[in-house]
Amino acid sequence: MIRSLLIANRGEIAVRIIRTCKEMGIRTVAVYSEADRDSLHTQMADQAVCIGPASSKDSYLNIGNLITAACTTRCDAIHPGVGFLSENPKFAEAVEESGLIFIGPTAQTIRMLGDKVQSRHTAVEAGVPVTPGSMEPISDATSAAQIADEIGYPVILKAAAGGGGRGMRIVREPKELPGAISIASREALAFFADGTIHMEKYLLNPRHVEIQLLSDGKGHVVHLGERDCSVQKNHQKLIEESPSPIIDEQMRRQMGADSVRLFSHIGYRGAGTIEFLVQDGNYWFMEVNARVQVEHPVTEMVCSTDIIRQQILIASGKSIELDGSAAKLTGHAMECRVNALTPGIVTTFSPPLGPSVRVDTHLFQGAQVSPHYDPMVAKVIVHGPDRQRTIEIMLRALREFKIEGIKTNIESQCIILQSKPFRSGSFGTDLHARLFDGENTR
């Protein structure tokens, strides 16, 4: 069993991991950049080690410094958290080669799933439906035009090695295609050091639904239901919920069975998420996130389980603490991401309390919100007996949340929650744009 663990991350996810480790009696080592010296995760951990200056490439992305910190503090394992190096196969290899346990899939699995072209092939092999598009990288504008004509416009170009909206371009008519290929490839090269792109049919205003899974790498795979992550801004998720208001029991069983089959097919180890696009009663594989997700607390609330704990148990060679292939969902859960719109010092911090409310954050009064890292500073997660009651609980919690010294997106989250499309459950990934950039549908 793992006894000492280094967390190769920062912010709320580092705090989240530390809390589970304390419950499991595991010693924790935090790492921090010079900008994060006084952060909450460094105060909560049993030991904290500085790994470099504020720049991520010199600190949280510095594999050598992270491995050295883990070895010198006599850790057994490293948890990568989310973002940074969490899906970097070179990091996973370096951890294992140093005699440490990597809490996540194998480097080989991460490498295979990180290549969006290869992952599409893998999904097809496992019998999981994929969106129409190229099964090989786009090599030139002529062949791309042929594929686009076959599947029909609009199409979307995607970086094979990336995500998060980088290296992504929507093409609505043939004359736009050559320029879009050049831009997408250059952006992919700049952000992921790989200019490879592929093409898929662009679905207009679909739903973004994902299946959370746990797999011990020995044949036991459990799916923990779905999360609807359709409320997004620039492909960045804002609100997540479980169960999805558009998924019926039959589709849930089908998506769950497909997801379990895919993870069994590749011998996946650890926690992972399969993302799907859903439209008109059909669903298509999009990608696998080979790590824990930011929105994992939504699933924890409806499944009454600790996903971080399960990750650690799996990495320690223990059994998943869930029987069968599907967990039972109870009630409805929702998460709103609180993003900082400006950096600064938090002068007032009063999180919401009360029944069925959870706040995952690294903020406190006097905390410094740095411009160097991701703007998400807190997650408000609530649980209720049904969707409408859960929305009311979330609105109450957000209105109770007091953060001063920095500007946040709390007000805009309340606007979304009160909008007619969101309340009815009839919306797609364009909801944020409809509410704030164009048509007023409140």
Image (cartoon, rainbow, N blue to C red):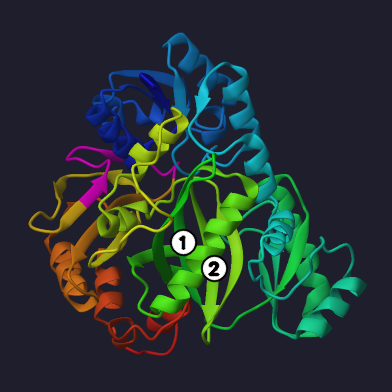
- Residue position for label 2: 276
- Residue stretch rendered in magenta on the structure: 359-373
User: x and y percent of residue 223 in the render?
Assistant: 43, 57
**Horizontal and vertical percent position of residue 260:** 53, 57
Q: Secondary structure at mark 2?
A: strand
Farthest right residue?
A: 142
**Residue at point 14%, 66% (across, down):** 399
Quadrant in the rendering for residue 340 = bottom left
Residue type for callout 2: Phe
The alpha-carbon separation of the residues under discs 1 and 2 comes to: 8 Å
Whether 401 is drawn above or below 239: the answer is above
Name the quarter where the C terminus is drawn.
bottom left
Asked which quadrant contains residue 1, the reply is: top left
Query: Of all residues shown, which one is farthest toward the left?
Result: 354
Q: Residue at x 41, y 83 (%)?
A: 427
Q: Position of residue 384 (x, y in %)?
A: 18, 67
| Neighbour tally class for label 1: few under 14, some 14-19, many 20 plus, Cα within 10 Å | many
Q: Nearer the viewer, residue 224 or 301?
A: 224
Tag 1–tag 2 contact (CB < 8 Å):
yes
User: In the picture provided, is 245 more to the left or to the right than 154?
Assistant: left
Position of residue 280 relative to residue 266, above or below, is below
Mark 2 is surrounded, within 10 Å at the Cα level, by few (under 14), some (14 to 19) or many (20 or more) other residues, namely many
Residue drawn at (68%, 42%) of the image: 111
Question: What amino acid is at disc 1?
Answer: Ile
Residue drawn where x is 57% and y is 24% of the image: 95
Q: Nearer the viewer, residue 214 or 390?
A: 214
Q: Position of residue 23 (x, y in %)?
A: 23, 30
Whether 362 is among the magenta residues is yes
Label number found at residue 211: 1
Residue 380 vertical placement versus 254 (above, below):
above
